[in-house]
Image (cartoon, rainbow, N blue to C red):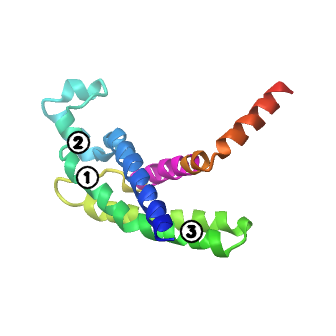
Amino acid sequence: MGKYFLDMFGFSLALTMVVELAVAFLFRRCWAGKSAVESAAAGKGTRLARKGRLPEDVLFAHPGRVLALVMLVNLLTNPLAVLLCWLGKVYLPFFLAWPVQLVVEAGAVAVEAYVYRSFSGKSGWRIGHPMALAVTTNVCSWLLGILAMAVKRQTWFHMLMLWLELLRQ
């Protein structure tokens, strides 16, 4: 049983970290906010700002800080979310497990957005859209987690066979 929990929590945390760090890195332009864009337009980045491209140091001044914050926030929210979803799956009927999972995920988004928001006002962080960052990263990791669980359980084969059958008709 201990190996099961270690696999469940470890796999979930590892997948969440990889996906959310990748999404946060890809959407780093959202962190700049208006002040960074305005300061670039006022300074030497005027020509680049008009073309929609800003210098990397303006958009992503301290990438390590924000990515470390994404990791720490996931260490805070992921284990509890996985535990609550697992308990819902074990003790609730199937039709109630999904709504519980959505409520738990919404709670994780709220906590992550609150933490990002609390850091966005501090100098040097530049998290321009904390709620968008929390929603985007969590939706992507949740969807890829569902896909990974389907592949892990090999239900993908059955889904593929159903799609092929539908395509034939």
Q: Position of residue 44 (x, y in %)?
A: 13, 29
**Residue 60: image tag:** 2
| Residue occupying the far right of the picture | 169
Q: Position of residue 95 (x, y in %)?
A: 73, 65
Q: Indicate the quadrant where residue 36 lies.
A: top left
| Residue at 17%, 35% in the rendered image | 42
Q: Amino acid at mark 3?
A: Trp
Q: Nearer the viewer, mark 1 or mark 2?
A: 1
Q: Position of residue 33 (x, y in %)?
A: 30, 46
Contact flag, marks 1 and 2 (Cβ < 8 Å): yes
Between marks 1 and 2, how big is the CA–CA gap? 9 Å
Q: Amino acid at mark 1?
A: Val
Between marks 2 and 3, how big is the CA–CA gap? 37 Å
Q: Which range is magenta?
A: 132-147
Q: Nearer the viewer, mark 2 or mark 3?
A: 3
Q: Which residue is mark 1?
A: 66
